[in-house]
Amino acid sequence: VQLVESGGGLVQAGGSLRLSCAASGRNIRSYTMGWFRQAPGKERDLVAAINWNGDSTYYADSVKGRFTISRDNAKKTLYLQMNTLKPEDTAVYYCNAVRGLGVSQVLWTWGQGTQVTVSS
């Protein structure tokens, strides 16, 4: 499976971005999918996850109420709508299949990620 993240960029605090993750080589339909982020010098953390049909989600406390994860299985694409962005959201964002909601263990090779930078 090849994962390609896109949609990152530079935004002012309070702004919004929508990230996309396109999967090729395998249909994501059967998998719980997650978004992770890694800030410089820090570990890669799970920030949101969604089950196979989209009716259950998980959010880290740090993004709850501001980020929304969604998916389009027909397009084999995962999304992350990020609102009310804060400087501490600055990181490289990655997607991957995970073993379960709230579970950080991933199933596939990482993509290149997409950089999100939030200025104060």
Image: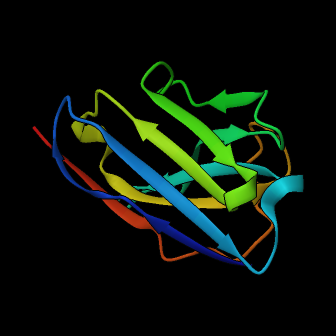
| Residue at 68%, 30% in the rendered image | 58
Q: Residue 77 falls in which quadrant of the image?
A: bottom right
| Percent of width and height locating residue 37 | 48, 53
| Residue at 67%, 60% in the rendered image | 75
Residue farthest top in this picture? 65
Q: Is residue 95 toward the left or the right of residue 49 in the image? A: left
Judging depth in this view, the residue of 24 and 120 nearest the camera is 24
Q: Is residue 22 toward the left or the right of residue 112 in the image? A: right
Q: Is residue 114 toward the left or the right of residue 106 in the image? A: left
Residue farthest left in this picture? 120
Q: Is residue 5 visible?
A: yes
Q: Quadrant of the N terminus?
A: bottom right
Q: Quadrant of the C terminus?
A: top left
| Percent of width and height locating residue 67 | 47, 31
| Percent of width and height locating residue 10 | 18, 54
Tell me the colour scheme of the image: rainbow
| Percent of width and height locating residue 68 | 52, 31
Q: Is residue 40 visible?
A: no
Residue 82, placed above or below residue 112: above
The count of marks equals 0
Residue farthest front in this picture? 74
Residue 45, placed above or below residue 60: below
Judging depth in this view, the residue of 12 and 25 nearest the camera is 25
Q: Is residue 12 toward the left or the right of residue 66 in the image? A: left
| Residue at 77%, 44% in the rendered image | 103
| Residue at 82%, 67% in the rendered image | 27
Residue 73, placed above or below residue 3: above
